[in-house]
Amino acid sequence: MQQKPNSSDMDFSICSKCLADQTRLTRNADGAECKICTLPFTVYHFKADSKTKRTVICHNCSKQRNVCQCCLLDLQWQIPIELRDRVLSALQDSQVTTAEAQNEMMKRFIALKNGDSHKLGGASVTSDANNTAQVLARMQERVADLQDSLSTTEKATNVKAAVSAPSGREGADISHLTKKLPLKSSLLEPSQSFFLYNIDPSMAEWAIVDAVSGIAGTPSWQDPMSTSVVINHLARCGGIRFKSSELAQRFQNGLDTFQTASKVTKGKLPVSNSKIHVVAWPQFHRAALGNKNTECLQLAKVLDTLVQRDLVPLPGVRPNIKETSKVGKPRKNRGTNKSKKSRRIMDIEL
């Protein structure tokens, strides 16, 4: 899906899904900071499908990644850039990643590069029609080869191999990662760093940063001279580090907490419609989040299991079914013709 032009300047990249049939945009020069490079940029407001939308990243960052300035999905394929890079990695038999800068200095350094010529990750493919055509042709060849291989006599064997192959990849040894991660830690431990897990793969990093800023009470909680935020969407986890213990303590105190079945206190960071689980991580180590796809997939599986354990209710706090039923019965018995009539009248008025 290509970007939808609507001005002679062409200083925005908004996909047709976000823009819909809207032809009128409100332009606000230097209206906000880019969620990626943090530099001020021209914001566009518009109304589509009865909802007010606006651009959240600058045009240059959008061109570097070939993403929509509103939804941050790839302009050509309309999928998250991480998924796009994984597809291209599989098709090209090489690692394709959109590496994001981890500190303010590098973010602004990359932002100074022209997005027309400097492409990150899979943007070099999806932003070019010829490269996209070659990739799609290669994809069709692989699909055709797979269909040919599933002959009548070998179909059962091939299907079994195809099903078992992913589980083998996901079963990669990640003991060297898990021993560096605070999987059994609590939120209440003194620390300037925290481990985040149960992160939705489609959740943007800037949304997590904004949520942390809201809890900490300031957007300036990161140390510009070091890595403060690391998010691995494939592994569904990440880490954050505050520049001072006071800010870290404020973040700890502001989080909603819960206790696991093993009586470990953990935190919940609300981001959009998701709840990210948070524990202290004194030995913040970005390499512990994994680099290879097989490691990340296996780590995501381990963390999904951990989330399920976190959600097991504590003994003695399960809902009392009998008590609930007792409360429910009087409501039915108390119902009178008068109350029914009132409810009917209210429905008519509405």
Image (cartoon, rainbow, N blue to C red):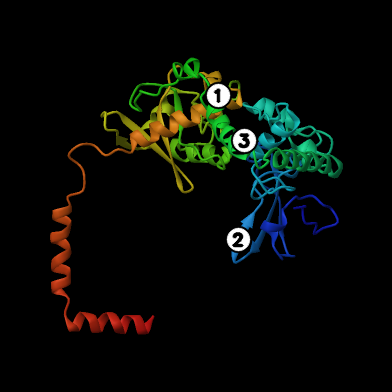
Residue type for callout 2: Thr
- N-term-proximal mark, 3 vs 2: 2
Badge 2 density bin: few <14, some 14–19, many ≥20, Cα 10 Å: few
Indicate which label's residue lies in the foreground, 3 or 2.
3
Residue designated by label 1: 295
Position of the C terminus, as image quadrant, is bottom left
Residue 24 x/y as whole percent: 73, 64
Residue 37 in sight: no
Q: Secondary structure at mark 3?
A: helix
Which is closer to the viewer, label 1 or label 3? 3
Near mark 3 (Cα within 10 A), the count class, few <14, some 14-19 or many ≥20, is: some
- Name the element at disc 1: helix
Q: Could you classify mark 1 by the number of other residues whose Cα lies within 10 Å: few (under 14), some (14-19), or many (20 or more)?
A: many
Of 281 and 226, which appears nearest the observer?
281
**Spatial CA span between label 2 and label 1:** 40 Å
Question: Residue 94 appears at what percent x and percent y?
Answer: 73, 26
> Secondary structure under badge 2?
strand
Label located before the other in sequence (2 or 1): 2
The quadrant holding residue 92 is top right
Q: Amino acid at mark 3?
A: Asn
Disc 1 residue type (three-letter): Glu
Mark count: 3
Which disc, if any, is residue 52?
A: 2
Across and down, in percent, residue 110 comes to 74, 30
